[in-house]
Amino acid sequence: MYVRPYTIFSTFHPVILLLYALGAPVITMFGRNPVFQLTACICALCVNVFYMGGKSARRGLRSVFGLFLLITVMNVILNPMGITVLFTVANRKVTLESLCYGVSNGLMLAGVLLWFRSFTAVLPNQKFLYLFGKRFQKTGLLLSMIVKLFPETRYKIQCIQQAQSTSGENSSSDERKTDIRMQIKKNMRQISSLLEWSMEDGIETADSMKARGYGDHIRTSYDVYKVSSGDKIMGAVLTIFLLVSVCEISVQNRGFLYYPTIAWKVNNLWLTLGGILCQIVFFLTPVWLEIKKGKRR
Amino acid sequence: MEICAENLNIIMPIVLILLMLPFFVIFERSKPRPKDLVPIAVMSALGALGRALFAAIPNFKPTTAIVMITGMQFGPLAGFLTGALSALVSNLFLGQGPWTLWQMSAWGMIGFVSGIFQKRGLFQYRTVLYLFGMISGILFGWILNLQYILGYVDHLNVETVAACYAASIWFDVTHGISTVVFLAILERPWGRKLHRLKAKYGILEKESE
């Protein structure tokens, strides 16, 4: 998967990246108002395109769209509340209100999923481990060990499959209709050899770690991140926008009713618009940072 | 404040994190050596990637069985860690989401409880083991359904919940069956192998005794 490697946003301290990467889906989850959810969804899509390019974003959109439809339909079928009846199917009322509620809920889930798609792009695994490796040293080490084991294990699986396919075993692609019992037996043998191989390697790793003095001193990290004054400013700005958005959303949630009929009480138009703007600024932080750079040049 | 879907979306993750935190803290306190870390790492990687080996058989997920075997051989805490971490790491590659925490706690609990069962000697009876595998396969699906129900369905009632569980029952049952098949074939040989490893290299001694 392609990920835009260098952005201005990625130069900030990992804590700030975490604040953004978790803040955005949390704001999206809070929302109940379709306007806010739509903006969140569109912003999430923009960030997806920004980090991973149009192609990957389109693929993500396709998978998210299915879930969106599923939730909308589920809600329409299961939820008979609301006054405006659109039509009746098998003695069940299908109401405009439940349809709208389903759409808004679907949008919420779609938005959250899109945010999580760009989570690793915003906060790469290495920085994630840096953040949590200090407090939870052993767990952090364990995590990075597993991450390292992944490509290795994949390679081993390939080796085992190739080796066994030469020893008179039918490879799975050759004969699709092999007995399922045989298939299971074969796979069980493969996973057993995988276990032995990996464990042996693991014991060697452990011995070599011990030989190199693991656990004798305080652990240091490969990457060093220091909190600079820019980080502090950025952190303050993001926190303010996050808090304003959350407050504004909870106010808007109270003002928006789905049942019995859809109603949106806007107390103060400017405040509402300001809230939406705040949200957009927070969501698109990595994008507008780049625009500023372009102008300076 | 009224408890509705959007509040639960925030509350449940916090509850789950608080549920899992003690296990990780105890693990940190136990001062594990590199030798103790390795089996957990290997088993988690196997649990997360084992699915790739069984790609030819639809819906066959060995993860639950692997987590159970780890819990049985290396003790409850190692079982919990294997379950939780294989969920977390496989999602690092497949994509994180709100379901990560639920998967982590569900698999973690399966590993933990099977470790306790083994300690109590309940798994001497094969029936208990298979029954446990079946139930944990189904329960895993049910716990993950909760994530969806609590988060995204408004106006909870029996009908909605039943519809959701009815929609997923086939997946849950196949998950349970695949766990039982895996345990039936591999529990004995893997148990022997891991036991020998433990005896030979003194892995996780403190804990599994």
Image (tube, grey):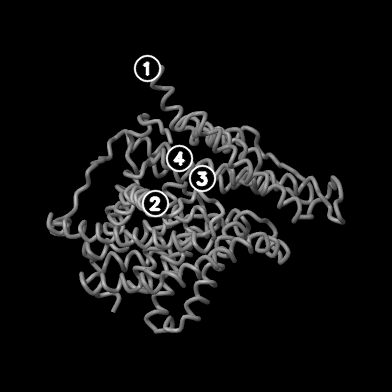
Quarter-of-image position of residue A292: top left
N-term-proximal mark, 3 vs 2: 3
In the rendering, which numbered label is found on residue A25? 3
**Do pointers 1 and 3 mark residues of a single chain?**
yes
N-term-proximal mark, 1 vs 2: 2
Residue at image mark 4: A240
CA separation, marks 1 and 2?
A: 55 Å
Neighbour tally class for label 3: few under 14, some 14-19, many 20 plus, Cα within 10 Å = many
**Do pointers 2 and 4 mark residues of a single chain?**
yes
CA separation, marks 3 and 4?
A: 17 Å
- Pair 2/4: label in front: 2
Mark 1 falls on what kind of element?
helix
Residue depicted at 45% across the width and 46% down the height: A22
In the rendering, which numbered label is found on residue A161? 2
- Direction from residue A112 to residue A162 in the image, left or right: left
Residue depicted at 37% across the width and 81% down the height: B119
Q: Please tell me whether residue B205 is drawn above or below residue A26 in the rendered image.
A: below
Residues marked 1 and 2 touching at CB (< 8 Å) = no
Residue A2 position, x and y percent, is 42, 33
Residue B91 position, x and y percent, is 44, 51
CA separation, marks 3 and 2?
A: 40 Å
Chain letter belonging to callout 4:
A
- Residue type beneath disc 1: Arg
- Pair 1/2: label in front: 2
Chain letter belonging to callout 3:
A
In the rendering, which numbered label is found on residue A296? 1
